[in-house]
Image (spheres, helix red, strand yellow):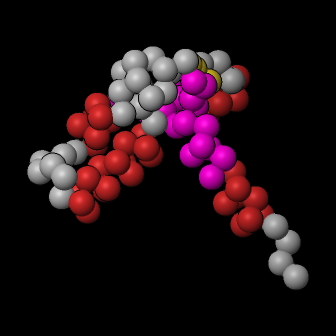
Amino acid sequence: MLTEGLKTGKGTIVYGNNSNCCWFCAEERMQENRKAQKRTGINHDTAAQELAGKFTAKPMFRFPIAGGPYLVCLDHMKQFVSYMEKLAAPKE
């Protein structure tokens, strides 16, 4: 299903709503909160709730796989593309 969705491009770019969150942003928030010990018992879902509304009306990449939605924001997509380009650059 993932490869078919990526191949056709259908449903891979969506606009966020009040409850959507980038998976990686939530992961970073969770790690920040744990490191600062701001809250105990924080997990990925509670970190995503803290970011509610941040991605409203912003384009996000949606992995069309079961168990999701798994969404990635534009900033994280740029980071991944930049890293991939660095890896693909010819070595001198």
Q: Nearer the viewer, residue 49 or 10?
A: 49
Left or right side of 75 for 49: left
Residue 89 position in % (x across, y down): 82, 67
Left or right side of 39 for 19: right
Q: Nearer the viewer, residue 13 or 37?
A: 37
Q: Residue 85, can we see it? A: yes
In the rendered image, residue 3 lying in the magenta stretch gets the answer: no
In the rendered image, residue 76 lying in the magenta stretch gets the answer: yes
- The quadrant of the picture occupied by the C terminus is bottom right
Q: Residue at x 64, y 18 (%)?
A: 10
Image quadrant assignment for residue 5: top right
Range drawn in magenta? 58-80
In the image, farthest residue toward the left: 40
Residue 61 position in % (x across, y down): 58, 31
Q: Nearer the viewer, residue 61 or 11?
A: 61
In the image, residue 32 sits, relative to residue 17, either above or below, namely below
In the image, residue 8 sits, relative to residue 27, either above or below, namely above
